[in-house]
Amino acid sequence: QVRLVQSGGGLVQAGGSLRLSCAASGLNFKIHELAWYRQEPGKQRELVATIASSGAANYADSVKGRFTISRDNVRNRLSLQMDSLKAEDTGDYYCTTKYKGNTYWGQGTQVTVSS
């Protein structure tokens, strides 16, 4: 059974930093593409960043240069380092991956950036 368990997040002032983590189990972690999404209140979930099995990363324009996605294929852990946070980064953040045709999500982590 695939499980994604998130940690990190919280409340931070604008300009500050936070780090999110996602511990994965139940799959061959190193071969799967992983991603972070976020959802603001009343809005649809949006893609923040993806990281391929090769380590190649892609980012939404809104977070380029401020967020860094990374993966640890030994510890089966996905991370999102968020720097220079802005009020508009506030939302619930989710890690996700696909496995055997199914999409799996972490439980979500709240990030609140005060201006």
Image (spheres, rainbow, N blue to C red):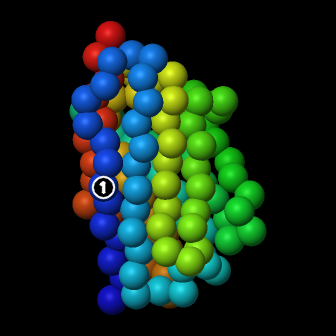
Q: Which residue is found at the position 33% from the left and 18% from the top? A: 13
Name the residue at the front extreme: 74
Q: Is residue 102 left or right of residue 13?
A: right
Q: Position of residue 36 (x, y in %)?
A: 47, 52
One can see residue 27 in this view: yes
Is residue 94 depicted above or below 23 in this figure? above
Instruction: Give the image quarter of residue 96.
Output: bottom left
The amino acid marked with disc number 1 is: Ser
Q: What residue lies at 74% left-to-right and 68% top-to-bottom? A: 54
- Above or below, 114 against 93 in this view is above
Task: Tell me the residue that label 1 is attached to.
Answer: 7
Q: Residue 77 appears at what percent x and percent y?
A: 48, 67
**Residue 8's x, y, as percent?**
32, 48
Q: Residue at x 31, y 67 (%)?
A: 5
Image location (x, y in percent) of residue 7: 30, 55
Q: The C terminus is located in which quarter?
A: top left
**Residue at (64% x, 32% y) in the render:** 64
Relative side of 82 to 41, left or right:
right
Q: Is residue 7 left or right of residue 95?
A: left
Q: Is residue 104 visible?
A: no
Q: Quadrant of the N terminus?
A: bottom left
For the residue carrying disc 1, how many other residues have a C-alpha within 10 Å: few (<14), some (14-19), or many (20+)? some
